[in-house]
């Protein structure tokens, strides 16, 4: 596979990757200008090589640190002699970091879904709208949505593409569709899964998932009823509580909030 094709493929599959390209070499050096390598955020090589050995290991370590900062830059690696006392060459490597934007998948294009969309759009999320009603999921209502998936829930949810940077908000127009949607996504690697519901409905649906063989570990990761307990019943207020919870999960701050609604 061409390294650029591999780069595109991995970018669609992973939240963070880096392309390392050798741009200059001096002295006694195993590296060659133009050599490329793709790594993920753990430093695993996905394609290519730039030099091998200690040069490559140091480059991977520095590239991982750059990915954590979301920064692209040129790094220089000094090559030491066999005693480690004298620099006998250098390698310049441009590290280009590719970080996907956070994504929010809103399953249900009603008033609450629209309120979540408006806040997520301000926060620069990639937004995907999913609904079975073409008169709700329209370009006029969701002009900044990255994509809209319209069709019968039983069909479209089977092919829903979910990444580890995906946040899923379930707010359909019927309880059975909420349960169907949750069953379709609960085993995914989504960062956040929340379902709009009251306590009784949430308890019933989560119990049904357990009866269908969904593990307690997966069920415990579902935020239902959705949203932080900040009060308010208007769709706009519910949208704020949902996005506040999404952000708290993103930044690992949920321990700051007592979410009494989850004590079902």
Image (cartoon, grey):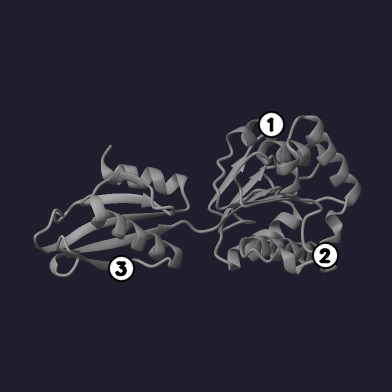
Q: How many numbered marks are there?
A: 3
Distance Cα–Cα, label 3 vs label 2: 43 Å
The quarter of the rendered structure image containing the N terminus is: top left
Q: Nearer the viewer, mark 2 or mark 1?
A: 2
Q: Which residue is mark 2?
A: 229
Q: Nearer the viewer, mark 3 or mark 1?
A: 3
Which of 260 and 115 lies nearest the eye of the viewer?
A: 260
Residue 145 relative to residue 195: left or right: left
Which of 223 and 234 lies nearest the eye of the viewer?
A: 223
Residue 84 relative to residue 125: left or right: left
The residue sitting at 40% across, 45% down in the picture is 10
- Residue 236, position in %: x, y? 76, 65
- Residue 129, position in %: x, y? 62, 49
- Residue 185, position in %: x, y? 66, 40
Element marked by disc 3: strand
Identify the disc placed on residue 73.
Answer: 3
The residue sitting at 46% across, 48% down in the picture is 14
Distance Cα–Cα, label 2 vs label 1: 31 Å
Q: Is residue 229 above or below residue 138?
A: below
């Amino acid at each position: 596979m061409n390294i650029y094709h591999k780069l595109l493929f991995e970018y669609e599959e992973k939240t963070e990757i880096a392309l390392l390209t050798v741009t200059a070499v001096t002295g006694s050096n195993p590296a060659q200008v133009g050599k490329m390598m793709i790594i993920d955020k753990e430093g695993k090589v996905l394609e290519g090589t730039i030099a091998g050995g200690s040069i490559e290991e140091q480059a991977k370590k520095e590239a991982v640190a750059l990915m954590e900062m979301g920064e692209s830059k040129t790094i220089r690696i000094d090559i030491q002699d066999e005693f480690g006392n004298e620099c006998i060459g250098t390698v310049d490597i441009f590290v280009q970091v590719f970080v996907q934007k956070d994504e929010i998948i809103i399953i249900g294009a009603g008033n609450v879904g629209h309120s979540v969309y408006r806040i997520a759009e301000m926060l620069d999320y990639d937004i995907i709208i999913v609904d079975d009603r073409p008169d709700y999921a329209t370009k006029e209502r969701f002009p900044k949505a990255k994509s809209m998936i319209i069709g019968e829930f039983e069909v479209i949810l089977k092919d829903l593409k979910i990444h580890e940077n995906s946040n899923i908000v379930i707010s359909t127009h019927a309880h059975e569709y909420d349960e169907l949607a949750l069953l379709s996504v609960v085993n995914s690697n989504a960062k956040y899964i929340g379902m709009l519901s009251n306590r009784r409905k949430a308890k019933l649906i989560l119990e049904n998932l357990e009866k269908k063989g969904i593990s307690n570990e997966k069920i415990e990761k579902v935020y239902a009823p959705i949203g932080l307990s900040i009060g308010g019943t208007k769709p706009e207020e519910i949208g704020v509580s949902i996005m506040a919870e999404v952000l708290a999960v993103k930044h690992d701050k949920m321990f700051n909030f007592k979410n009494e609604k989850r004590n079902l």
